[in-house]
Amino acid sequence: MSMRLLNVCVLILLVVAAIMVYEIKFESTLRAERVAKMRADVRRERDAIAALRAEWSALENPARVQGLVRRHMPLGPAQPTQFDSLDRLPARPPTVVKPPREDAIATMIENPDFTPPTGSVFAPGRFDAR
Amino acid sequence: MESPAQTGSQSAAAPSAEPWRRRFMRTMLYGRNVDRAAKAKARVGLAIAGFSVLYAIIAVRLVMFAVVPESNIARRTVTKDAVATARPDILDRNGMILATDVRTPSLFAEPRRIIDVDEAVELLTAVVPDLDSNELRDRISTRRGFAWLKREITAKQQQDIWRLGLPGVGFLSENKRVYPNHAEVSHLIGHVNIDNQGIAGIEKWLDGRGLAALHMAGLAADRLQRPVNLAVDLRVQHALRDELIFAAEKFKVKAAAGLIVDVDTGEIVSMVSLPDYDPNSPKQANDPLRINRLTTGVFELGSTFKALTTAMALDSGKINLNSTFDARGSLRYGKFNISDYKGKNRVLTVPEIFIYSSNIGTAKMALALGVEHHKWFLKKLGQLDRLRTELPESAEPLVPKKWGELNTVTIAFGHGLSIAPLQAVAGINALVNGGLLIPPTFLKRSKEEARAIAKQVVKPETSDKMRYLMRLNAERGTSTRAEVKGYYVGGKTGTSEKVVNGRYARNKLLTTFTAILPADKPRYQILIMLDEPQGLKETHGYATSGWNAAPTAGRVIARVAPMLGIEPRFDLPPADQLILARVRP
């Protein structure tokens, strides 16, 4: 009796195992196909990128750009006198503060803490501190 | 069904008392007197053995599937690529593309499967007009299995041929080499043939590095090869070529060439030789006029060579900047008479000899040191041996077989020894970069790598003096027209007469100009070479180097210096102070 039960169990296990193996096999075939397809896609994309890059570099070819610039823009080659170093850059020109329209003296009387804008300029050195 | 009572009675009668039908079957299957038990045992054994073998085979196959990767699956998609000839991209030093692969379809036929040859010929020539109908007919009339009809057709043509619905005609996609910059870098990178094999320039060098073997094995189908970075800068290359074309038209030259080399690393930043060709249509390259004059041509470089002679004199220690040589009249040597072009007719110091480009003075300097010393020095600077670079093309210098005093006299000022211009540039590099001879290269190279392979050929002090002399020349010598304010250019002109029918022709000149930039601490050397420039009204009819090659170099420098990262400086001392400051400590 127990022998028969064992046999039945083994039989069921066998069937289950066969189904699982089939599933795995099927899955792996599907995946392999997907991988192959993706590889082909990647390849095609890479080829497309290469073609576009080739076109891009043909478009930014210096001779072509030079021809376009000569035709459409008033630019010329940079002269040596047009270069300078950063530390010789002059400081930013001072900003002029406009005096307010209303009566400054009246405001001062009403409000002792108020320092009126005088229309004078900032010293160049003080600029960074602000 | 037999009843139990019946069975019992029969078994007692005889052991063989089976029903007759069963007995009959047994007799038919096993024979009359066989021991069934023994036979069954043997049979089970046989079955065990058979299944063991079967399972062993399955196990082995499983292991094989597991060990060998899924190459079969991957390969299936690549079958459409007939020829595995992918090449790595070639980039310039900033990563701009100089050469790349683009996939294009090619048309082939399987003649065996073509039904109506006439119809196929007619339809195909209608779609692809540049197919020759007779040749096409010959190709598809055979009984072969495969024939190329047209390599590299356009996508539109492919579509049209699809629409024709011809049997026995198909497409394979192939890698086609594309040079988006056309003629700009032609001589440098070379070109490939229809099978994507490099046949000139850097392309051929790539094949020599094992790419050809990859192609043979059919393994180079993929695009994933590492791109090759060259030392050339496309922008500089364009600027140089543009200025050379300008000069070529202005001075009506037969050929022009230019070279820009990094003095410290030997990297060739730009190389142009006009007339050049478009590598996309390499047929032009077979024209002998379009050779690369800088590496495959050898020339007598004229006075440019005086820089080498002067450096030799200063490096020997026997002659210094204050030595004087008599440059009066002319130097008679056998039946030869050597004179100066617009000679000063007086005793000249070494700097004066250099800046007035005195033939007599330079010859006397070389003679003072002797023939052997001269030969030894030029050999040391690599001027007498073939210079090899990555480019497969190179030329052997034409060295006189018997080198006597007369040869030393003429070679001192650049006649009688023909060398490749690139070779001279490598030599002069050593004179201005502190005395290191560095073999020029088309690939990127760092200063450290360059120093590792460099050879000290002249003393650093000599190098300082040469910088001074070249700067002096740009300030008041023959090279003043090359001066660009702010870049502190130094240089040496060279004008040589070309040999026509074994004689020097007075009106056929080869002018060269070698510039260093900036002269106080050179970073780049620039060579300009013009073949047979004509005198113009604005040059007062002169066609010597100072009137054409030198101003061309000036224009090139003004354009390329900002690209090369050289800052203009306007607070620089004149050349005399340059040498005083150097010599004092």
Image (spheres, grey):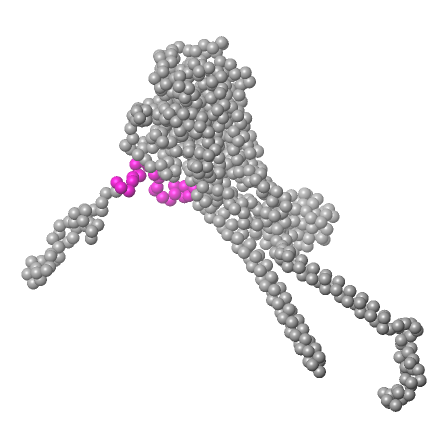
Residue B311: name its quadrant: top left
Is residue B516 at least partly visible in the picture? yes
In this view of the protein, which residue sits in the foreground, A87 or B531? A87
Nearest the viewer among A100 and B575 is B575
Span highlighted in magenta in the image:
A62-88
Residue B46 in the image: above or below residue B280: below
Q: Is residue B159 above or below residue B378?
A: below
Residue at x-position 55% and y-position 49%: B223
Q: Residue at x 38, y 41 (%)?
A: A70
Q: Does the magenta segment cover residue A85?
A: yes
The image shows residue B529 at horizontal and vertical percentages of 45, 28
- Report the residue at 54% width, 45% height from top: B88
The N terminus of chain B sits in image quarter? bottom right
> The C terminus of chain B is located in which quarter?
top left
**Residue A47, horizontal then vertical, whole percent:** 54, 52
Any part of residue B489 in sight:
no
The number of numbered discs placed on residues in the rendered structure image is 0
Residue B292, percent from left and from top: 51, 31
Side of B217 relative to B251 (left or right): right
Q: Main secondary structure of the magenta part?
A: helix
Q: Going 71% across and 49% down the picture, which residue do you hit?
A: B145
Left or right of B353 in this view: B20: right
Q: Position of residue B227 (x, y in %)?
A: 51, 45
- Asked if residue B480 lies in the magenta stretch, the reply is no
The answer to whether B535 is drawn above or below residue B7 in the figure is above
Query: Front-most of B127 and B528?
Result: B528
Q: Residue furthest front?
A: B12
